[in-house]
Amino acid sequence: MDYLSRESAPFSADLWKKVDDAVVNTASRVLIGRRFLNIFGPLGSGIQSINLDNFDETKSIEEETIDGISRIKNREYKEIPLIYSDFTLPWRDIESSEKLGYPVDLSAATFAAEACAQKEDKLIFLGSESAGYEGIFNAKGTNKIKKNDWKSGENPFTDIASAVEILTEQGIYGKLALIVSPDLYLQMQRIQPGTGVLESDRISKLLHGNIFTSPILGKNKAALLCTEPNYIDIVIGQDIATAYLELRDLNHVLRILETVLLRIKNRKAIVVFE
C-alpha cells in the first residue's frame, strides 16, 4: 500500500515529478541544520523511535543483567516526531494544464516546503517544550558562556575563541560550527581597525568557514558546537516527501511530511552564548 496515497490523485507522472522537484529544491535551499549536522538515515517511514545514548559521563555502552534479563544501561528511546505542512492545488489549474498545456503554478507547494523546512530547523535549534524535545539552544547540561557586545572591538572573535578553548579542555575534538541569529551575523560584518579584515573573516578562518545563520533563532542567539556524529546528529525516518491528502471542494489537498529528530549524545560538545 502506498501510504502517501499518490494513486488517489488524478496527476500525471510528469506533474508529480514537478511537485517533488519544487518541494525538495525549496527545502534544500531553506534547511540550515542539515548543512552542518550529520544525517543518520533515512531509516524509513515505519521507524517510529530511535535509541538515545548519553555519552556525557561515559564513553562506552554497558550491558547489565538482572535475573537473567539483559539490558543496556542508561539508554532511552525517543519517538521520532512527524513534521508536516499542507497546501492546495486548484482543480481548474490541473484542468488548464491537461487541456491547454499551461504549466501548473506550484507556488503553494514551495511555500509549504519552506514552512516544513523551517519547522525542522526550529525543532533542531529550539526544540519543543510542549512536545518534550530539546534543541541545541535549550538542551540541559550544555556549556554556557557570557556573550560580550559583538558590536564593538574584537568581542565576537574573543568570545568564540574562548568557546573553542572550553571544548578543547573537555576533550571535544573535531569539526566545529557556529550558528548565529541574523543580527549577530551582521554585527560580525565589521572591518577591524588597522587590519582591513572583517571580523567574520577572522572567525571563519578559525572555524574553517563553518558559520551559519537562521531567522528561526530570532535575535541575540549564538552557539558553537562540535558536529562530529559521535557527539550530535539528526535522525531521519521518512525524508521530506509529498502525499495526496484529500479532495476538498473539488480542489486537491496535499501534505509535505517528514520524521526527524535531533540526537544529542554529548551535551558538553555544545557551547551556548548567553
Image: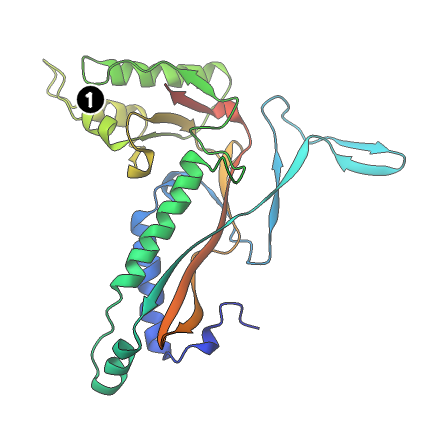
**With 17 as the anchor, is 4 left or right in this view?**
right
Residue at 30% x, 23% y is 206
Residue at 53% x, 52% y is 237
In this view, 265 is above or below 119:
above
**With 58 as the anchor, is 118 left or right in this view?**
left
Residue at 46% x, 34% y is 135
The quarter in which the N terminus is drawn is bottom right
Total numbered labels: 1
In this view, 195 is above or below 50:
above
User: Residue 266 versus residue 187: which sits nearer the camera?
Assistant: 187
Q: Position of residue 93 (x, y in %)?
A: 26, 76
The quarter in which the C terminus is drawn is top left
Residue furthest to the bottom in view is 99
The local crowd at label 1, few if under 14, some if 14 to 19, many if 20 or more residues have their Cα within 10 Å, is many
Q: Position of residue 32 (x, y in %)?
A: 34, 42
Residue 72 sits in quarter: top right
Residue at 39% x, 46% y is 119
Residue furthest to the right in view is 67
Residue 45 sits in quarter: bottom right
User: Residue 226 versus residue 98: which sits nearer the camera?
Assistant: 98
At mark 1, the secondary structure is helix
Q: Position of residue 125 (x, y in %)?
A: 41, 35
Q: Amino acid at mark 1?
A: Glu
In this view, 70 is above or below 171:
below
Q: How is the image coloured?
A: rainbow
In this view, 134 is above or below 242:
above
Write down the residue under mark 1: 199
User: Residue 265 versus residue 171: which sits nearer the camera?
Assistant: 265
